[in-house]
Amino acid sequence: MPRRLGLPSVYLAAAVATAATTAVPLAMTPASGLSLRPSPSEPTHPYIVTARSRGAARDLVGEVRWRVRRYYTAALPGFATFLTAAELAELRTDPRVRAIEPDRPIHATPAAGTRPPKRAAATVYVVDSGVDTGRPEFGDLAWRAFDATGGTGHDCAGHGTEVARRLHAAAPDARIGSVRVLGCDGSGTLTDVLAGLDWIHRHARGPSVANLSLDGSGSPAFDSAVRSLVRSGVSVTRGGAIRQNPSAASNLHIRNGGL
């Protein structure tokens, strides 16, 4: 004789069915790196898609038509994905898309930059190969904030730690947040660098500086993310140059200097 469902069981079954049809796809979560689309039969290549607005980016990702690797929600309205030639052509004609560019390698550059804020409450985010936060000279000022490479934030290249040491020597009271975007060979991807900038945009509070001793020149998505970060109030230093929001200038004491 078939088993009859009691009233609680009926409610449970209905709840499960509703959740299955209304749940937000995993690809909608920032940096999920998951895709629900079947594997293509033709070769794919990595790209960065910049949408015309955050709403347009959300709609594109929500369609679950693309192999979303990263979904940027703050610094850049867009996502990283793998595309076939046909999919690339299709997206280029989508009115919701502003630009598409290939993902590419990013490399560390010589540790030249700027002196960080002198105020005790200021934070410098070192966007690099990580920081050895256990070094005695940092005390309790340095911490591993975010690792876009999927690791633990450990600096196996040494470049980020050297940058942090010079920053700390120039401003011993500034807090140092390690945002790892480069691997052990001192290189990484544009996708991960954008993820690091996106994380800073969502989490920075108070007077803050993002130090980028890496090469992102020639990337529209990178430039857009940097401009967005500056507009949010986070100053950005790259290769000795400083970009900051005029409204934040009175809160930060920054001057050029070789690191």
Image (tube, rainbow, N blue to C red):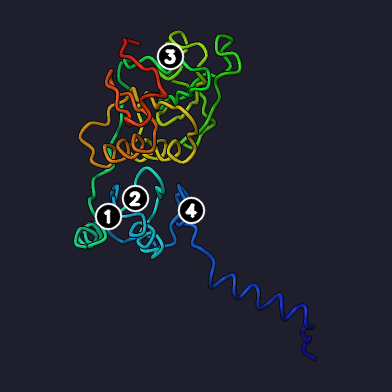
Task: Choose the circle earlier in sequence order: 1 or 4.
Answer: 4
Q: Residues within 10 Å of mark 3 (few under 14, many from 20)?
A: many
Task: Choose the circle earlier in sequence order: 2 or 4.
Answer: 4
Q: Residues within 10 Å of mark 2 (few under 14, many from 20)?
A: many
**Contact between labelled residues 4 and 1, with CB atoms less than 8 Å apart:** no
Residue on which the image places disc 2: 77
Kind of residue sitting beneath label 4:
Thr
C-alpha span from label 3 to label 1: 36 Å
Task: Choose the circle earlier in sequence order: 2 or 3.
Answer: 2
- Which of 41/218 is in front? 218
The label shown at residue 29 is 4
C-alpha span from label 1 to label 2: 7 Å
C-alpha span from label 2 to label 3: 31 Å
Who's the residue at 45% across and 23% down the image? 124
State the SS at label 4: loop
**Contact between labelled residues 3 and 2, with CB atoms less than 8 Å apart:** no
Residue on which the image places disc 1: 52
**Contact between labelled residues 3 and 4, with CB atoms less than 8 Å apart:** no
State the SS at label 2: loop
Left-right relation of 27 to 41:
right
Whole-percent x, y for residue 182 in the image: 40, 29
Task: Choose the circle earlier in sequence order: 1 or 2.
Answer: 1
* Residue 226 visible in the snapshot: yes
Whole-percent x, y for residue 42 in the image: 27, 58
Who's the residue at 33% across and 14% down the image? 255
**Contact between labelled residues 2 and 1, with CB atoms less than 8 Å apart:** yes
The label shown at residue 167 is 3
State the SS at label 1: loop
C-alpha span from label 1 to label 4: 19 Å
The image shows a total of numbered marks equal to 4
